[in-house]
């Protein structure tokens, strides 16, 4: 896990990452083409050079929105020390986001930006929620859509886990 730093620094990181990704997409998409083979080659390049960033930047943004939500809701004090895995690069032992205060873990959270709980996403959700139950502090699962919230709440209820699902629509303050 990495220390988050200030919210302003984290917001600047998300913005810089998004700008870099969009610049790369603009550069690739500006390549001219006159035949379907070249067009598909360019599309494949856009996908291969942006796919991971498209997923990871959304993840780090939602993690940042979760921090802001914890502070706004008064669940964590302003002095909370935040640690995160902004790019889903954590191991299977640490949460995506953790808030510590005076050496005590107040909250642990997992983040998903998936829109629908279909197929492998549904299986991954169960595994992620099970992992979250092994963490310290209040447990939260942050999602972006009502369908993900509904599915997560069903899994949590059936397994009798003490996890709060939070649906966040991130907007600038």
Image (cartoon, rainbow, N blue to C red):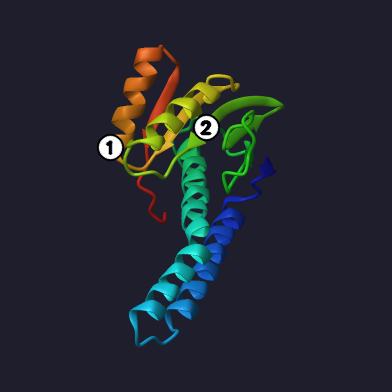
Residue drawn at (52%, 56%) of the image: 52
| Residue 136 disc label | none
170 in relation to 158, above or below: below
Q: Quadrant of the N terminus?
A: top right
Residue at horizontal 34 percent and vertical 24 percent from the top? 153
Residue with the most extreme right position? 103
> What is the x, y in percent for residue 161?
44, 15
- Neighbor class of circle 2 (other Cα within 10 Å; few <14, some 14-19, many 20+) is many
Determine the residue positioned at 51% across, 75% down.
23
Residue 19's spot in the image, x, y percent? 51, 69
Instruction: Assess whether mark 2 and mark 1 are in contact (beta carbons under 8 angstroms).
Output: no
Q: Which residue is mark 2?
A: 109
Q: Nearer the viewer, residue 97 or 121?
A: 121
Determine whether 26 is above or below 58 in the image: below
36 left or right, relative to 2? left
Disc 1 from disc 2: Cα separation: 18 Å
Q: Which residue is mark 1?
A: 146
Give the camera-side residue of 111 and 25.
25
Residue at image point 35% right, 36% down? 119
Point out residue 55 in the picture as x, y percentages from the top left corner: 47, 53
Q: Give the camera-side residue of 127 and 150.
A: 127
Location of residue 105 by image quarter: top right
Question: Which element carries disc 1, helix, strand or loop?
Answer: helix
Residue 36, given in percent of the width and then of the height, sits at 34, 79
**The C terminus, quarter of image:** bottom left
Assign a secondary structure to mark 2: strand
Mark positioned earlier in the residue sequence (1 or 2):
2
Image label count = 2
Q: Quadrant of residue 147?
A: top left
């Amino acid at each position: 896990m990495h220390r988050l730093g200030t919210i302003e620094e984290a917001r600047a990181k998300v913005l810089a990452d998004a700008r870099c990704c969009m610049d790369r997409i603009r550069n690739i998409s500006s390549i001219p083409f006159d035949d379907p083979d070249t067009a598909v080659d360019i599309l494949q390049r856009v996908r291969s050079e942006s796919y991971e960033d498209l997923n990871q930047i959304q993840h780090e943004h939602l993690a940042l929105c979760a921090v802001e939500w914890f502070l706004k809701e008064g669940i964590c004090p302003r002095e909370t020390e935040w640690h995160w895995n902004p790019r889903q690069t954590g191991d299977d032992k640490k949460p995506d986001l953790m808030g510590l205060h005076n050496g005590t873990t107040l909250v642990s959270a997992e983040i998903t930006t998936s829109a629908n709980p279909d197929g492998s996403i549904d299986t991954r959700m169960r595994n992620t929620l099970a992992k979250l139950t092994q963490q310290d502090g209040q447990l939260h699962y942050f999602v972006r859509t009502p369908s993900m919230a509904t599915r997560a709440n069903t899994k949590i209820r059936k397994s009798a886990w003490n996890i709060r699902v939070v649906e966040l629509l991130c907007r600038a303050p």
